[in-house]
Image (cartoon, grey):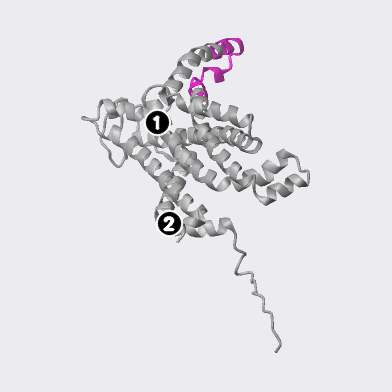
Amino acid sequence: MTLVQTNPIITDDEPPVSLWRDAWHRLKRNKLAIFGLCVIVVLAFAAVFGPYLTPFDFLSQDLDARNQAPSLLHLFGTDDLGRDVFSRVVYGTRTAFLVAVVVTAIALAIGTTLGAIAGFFGDPYDRVIMWLTDMTMSVPNLLLVVVINASLKNPIAKWMEAQYMATLNPFYRETIWIDFFLVFGSMALISWPPYARLVRAQVLSIRSRPYITAAMALGLPNRIIMMRYVVPNALGPLIVSVSAGLGTAMVLESAFSFLGVGVNPPTPSWGNMISDGLRVWQHYPHLLAAPAFVLGLASVAFSFLGDGLNDALNPRGSK
């Protein structure tokens, strides 16, 4: 009897199976995750192009149209200065996305670097970095942000005023950059420890794999091993954490702006708009409802997307 060996035929219509392709197919089956992704895409589009498409400027005042209810002309009504609330909410989307993306990027860079060093090299780096992580997480977030703003805002403002007097460059009169600098720095300072812990745990698991041992035996530098083999294999859980971190950063920025230690008026932020609307919500509920609804929608969308990514990138969780 002759045994005939058959091989599967791979056609162009059937691309090879990969982790990311399978993850995308699992993600597409999650309706809540797709809903969250669609909401995030719409909000991102509004953040980039919305201020150019809104019918009114977010700073334009019309005292004859103060505190108007929502209408076809003003979709979310107007505030106590006659400013269009819809235009301000749309511009607040840009503020929220800018803060969320920059803060998450800074925190991710710090956390990934320190976590990879701690997990790959071990003691004494691991002990020092984990001590620093625990110390940072033990300090209340709000207290740390308030201390940073209270101690640095006035010196930075005086320095910018001195630079303006010396150069007459109008850039140094834009106080919004002080708010952004302090918000970026303070929020990144409190956001990196979870990324460091997650990356450290992943690296501790990965560094004992055979391909890492083989790379070390070949004499590859530690930097190359970490960049090519360790960090890329830890990206799955990290992507899930980043998607959740973006939503958390938006909520934190709104909370700090609500308390007066974030982005301050006249730059629109969902937090300071909620703070202003809370004072008059009994008479003009639209001033509170509009920014609060959009903030809640963005937070839920990132939560749905994070859960969907967790299921999609975790093959054990697929059914």
Say few, some or many: other residues with alpha carbon within 10 Å of mark 1 (under 14 / 14 to 19 / 20 or more): many
Residue 34 got which mark? none
Considering the image in quadrants, where does the C terminus appear? Answer: bottom left
Q: Is residue 295 visible?
A: yes
Eyeballing the image, is 163 above or below 199?
above
Q: Which residue is mark 2?
A: 30
Give the extent of the magenta segment: 160-181
Most common SS among magenta residues: helix
Q: Nearer the viewer, residue 314 or 240?
A: 314
Q: Nearer the viewer, residue 277 or 206?
A: 206
Where residue 12 sits: x, y (%)? 64, 69
Q: Viewed as shown, does residue 3 lie left or right of 36?
A: right
Where residue 304 sits: x, y (%)? 41, 48
Eyeballing the image, is 264 above or below 311?
above
Residue 254 got which mark? 1
Q: Residue at x 69, y 84 (%)?
A: 3
Q: Does residue 168 belong to the magenta stretch?
A: yes
Q: Is residue 56 visible?
A: no
Q: Residue furthest bottom?
A: 1
User: How many marks overall?
Assistant: 2
* Residue type highlighted by circle 2: Asn
* Residue type highlighted by circle 1: Ser
SS assignment at label 1: helix
N-term mark: 2 or 1: 2
Q: Residue at x 54, y 43 (%)?
A: 238
Q: Does residue 243 belong to the magenta stretch?
A: no
Eyeballing the image, is 151 above or below 282?
above
**Image quadrant of residue 11?**
bottom right
Where residue 168 sits: x, y (%)? 58, 14
